[in-house]
Image (spheres, rainbow, N blue to C red):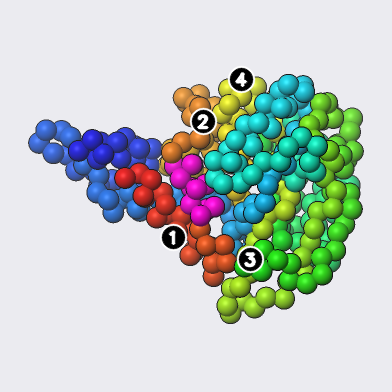
């Protein structure tokens, strides 16, 4: 009965979906296991968005090297440590100081200008050119990244590899992708304050010749850029912002997802704007999704298969 009450409390966030709670004579609320699975399915379907060309969620497969710019050295290191800790919780390693960053986080007073400048002046940094055979959300999504005002915005680049992580053919390296390049494109707008880590040079792109009839390939995340608007996060607790950024760094989040039905830190800015109580950190649902994604089959035939595995992980974690 205690377990059922806990599940009922969790599902209070998703009343629009879960309308099958049964009132007992003692006024206790009982939630069926099938309803938990239904809500978990909806949650898993909403969180992430994979590039249409691949229909496969990407994830990091190697150690994260986090670089943070636009904060004091102490504050930047706090963010680096927080993201690295979240990465280790799902089985990723975190590189030591002096590594070449593959995750770049920029705090800026005017993220709209910064994002537009980076997209306009460093398209190679953003995987714009198809000759590299990198995988991104596409040029339309890149324009939305540059033009849509957000407290936090993100851009992910992945590479197609074999099921065991090997390049499918010769790998070419385009020099000049990373912290220093992003900051150079954004100079003069308050982004280039303290920075941890070195410039990320040598983002690899893989030429893939796999068949779509039988998935023997996977998507390995190779670079991510996250831009945080310092003014739009004013008044929000730093740990909550850091967990939001961690989600945006570790998952191909859908920027247009409606998460209002679910208990998740991804509601942070919508709740802040509406004057509602804020979720102070990742919830059990967020952590279950992360664990599910990083435990799911890498070479899955499609995102539907991956979501089914993630859903099972969420349901199991709620038992």
Q: Give me the C-alpha separation between circle 2 and circle 4.
A: 15 Å
Q: Which residues are magenta?
A: 285-295
* Residue 82 pos. (x, y %): 62, 31
Give the residue at mark 2.
281
Q: Give me the C-alpha separation between circle 3 and circle 1.
A: 22 Å
Instruction: Determine whether the residue tagged by mark 4 lies in a helix, strand or loop.
Output: loop
Who comes first in sequence, dot 3 or dot 1?
3
Give the residue at mark 4.
235
Instruction: Determine whether the residue tagged by mark 2 lies in a helix, strand or loop.
Output: loop
Q: Say the numbered circle drawn on residue 164.
A: 3
Camera-side mark, 3 or 1: 3
Label 1 Cα crowd, 10 Å radius (few <14 / some 14-19 / many 20+): some
Instruction: Determine whether the residue tagged by mark 3 lies in a helix, strand or loop.
Output: loop
Q: Are marks 3 and 4 in contact (CB under 8 Å)?
A: no
Camera-side mark, 2 or 4: 2
> Does the segment drawn in magenta span residue 175?
no
> Where, quadrant-wise, is the C terminus in this rendering?
top left
Who comes first in sequence, dot 1 or dot 2?
2
Q: Is residue 60 above or below residue 305?
A: above
């Amino acid at each position: 009965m205690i377990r059922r009450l806990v599940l009922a409390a969790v599902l209070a966030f998703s009343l629009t979906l879960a309308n099958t709670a049964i009132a007992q004579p003692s006024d206790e609320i009982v939630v069926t296991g099938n309803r938990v699975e239904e809500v978990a399915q909806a949650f898993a379907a909403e969180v992430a968005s994979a590039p249409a060309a691949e229909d496969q969620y990407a994830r990091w497969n190697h150690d994260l090297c986090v670089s943070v710019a636009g904060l004091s050295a102490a504050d930047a290191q706090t963010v680096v440590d927080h993201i690295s800790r979240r990465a280790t919780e799902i089985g990723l390693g975190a590189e030591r100081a002096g590594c070449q960053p593959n995750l770049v986080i920029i705090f800026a007073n005017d993220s709209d200008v910064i994002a537009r400048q980076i997209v306009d002046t460093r398209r190679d940094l953003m995987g714009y050119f198809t000759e590299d055979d990198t995988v991104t959300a596409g040029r339309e999504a890149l324009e939305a990244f540059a033009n849509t005002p957000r407290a936090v915005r993100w851009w992910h680049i992945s590479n197609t590899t074999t099921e065991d992580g090997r390049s499918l053919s010769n790998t070419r390296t385009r020099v000049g992708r990373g912290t220093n390049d992003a900051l150079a494109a954004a100079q003069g707008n308050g982004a280039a304050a303290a920075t941890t880590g070195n410039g990320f040079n040598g983002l690899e792109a893989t030429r893939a010749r796999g068949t779509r009839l039988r998935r023997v390939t996977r998507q390995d995340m190779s670079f991510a850029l996250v831009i945080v608007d310092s003014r739009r996060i004013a008044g929000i607790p730093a740990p909550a912002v850091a967990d939001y950024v961690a989600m945006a760094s570790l998952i191909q989040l859908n920027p247009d997802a409606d998460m209002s039905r679910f208990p998740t830190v991804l509601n942070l800015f919508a709740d802040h704007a509406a004057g509602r109580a804020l979720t102070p950190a990742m919830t059990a649902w967020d952590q279950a999704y992360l664990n599910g994604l990083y435990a799911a089959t890498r070479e899955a035939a499609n995102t539907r298969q991956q979501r089914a595995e993630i859903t099972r992980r969420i349901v199991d974690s709620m038992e």
